[in-house]
Image (cartoon, grey):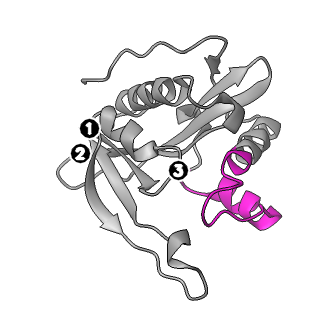
Amino acid sequence: DDIPNVPIPRPFDIRPIDPSEAAMHRRVFEADARAFADSYGQEATSEAQWAAFVGSPNFDPTLWRVAFDGEVIAGQILNFMDEPREDGTCLGMTEAISVQPEYRRRGLARALRAESRRAVRDAGATSAGLGVDTQNPNQALTLYENLGFRIVSETFEYELGRSPADAGPAGTLGAP
């Protein structure tokens, strides 16, 4: 309930995404890939990934928050609801958070995060969570912590053949 009121910076607007509008779903999928093109572990998208994206049980465009600059997708958060827990609580996951490089550092991610938390709260979530690469060069961890999230668990990825400088811990954050 303690969600900050963060105005959406100009010239952006957040628009609903129609669950039946497959062409827009594809645009959102491709915008996410573009935003992370230079990130650790990012691979070129494939038709198999697209099929998995739209076929996922977490696919729920009614919970997405997508920011536009005119007709260009500037940023997005693709929320979904986790399964309710035995104690009646439910986690709203605020994932696939991305802002296109040319739109970063304008307050858009902060505004999207606030709108995103409202979306999952209104859908019945009692808390919100997300995953983040703690080594993200765009200071994502700092943004999320400034919005009230805290680290509740950490995972590590190990790969043979990558330099240690390419790898980093990934944390899962949660907020009440």
| Dot 1 and dot 2 residues touching (CB under 8 Å) | yes
Question: Residue at (73%, 35%) from the top-left corner?
Answer: 20
The N terminus lies in quadrant: top left
- Whole-angstrom CA distance, mark 3 to mark 2, is 33 Å
| Dot 1 and dot 3 residues touching (CB under 8 Å) | no
**Magenta residues, start to end:** 32-58
Which label lies toward us, 1 or 3? Answer: 3
Q: Amino acid at mark 1?
A: Thr
Q: Amino acid at mark 2?
A: Thr
Which quarter of the picture shows residue 106? top right
Name the disc covering residue 126, or none: 1
Measured as percent of width and height from the top left, residue 3 is found at: 31, 23
**Residue 75 among those drawn in magenta:** no
Which quarter of the picture shows residue 37? bottom right
- Whole-angstrom CA distance, mark 1 to mark 2, is 6 Å
Q: Is residue 50 toward the left or the right of residue 137 in the image?
A: right
Check disc 3 and report the residue beneath it: 137
Q: Amino acid at mark 3?
A: Pro
Disc 3, SS: loop
Disc 1, SS: loop
Measured as percent of width and height from the top left, residue 13 is found at: 63, 16
Q: Is residue 68 toward the left or the right of residue 146 in the image?
A: right
Q: Earlier in the sequence, mark 3 or mark 2?
A: 2
Question: Residue at (37%, 15%) from the top-left corner?
Answer: 5
Q: Is residue 171 visible?
A: yes
Check disc 2 and report the residue beneath it: 89
Q: Is residue 18 visible?
A: no
Considering every residue shown, the one lying at the far bottom of the view is 160
Measured as percent of width and height from the top left, residue 33 is found at: 71, 51
Disc 2, SS: loop
- Whole-angstrom CA distance, mark 1 to mark 3, is 30 Å
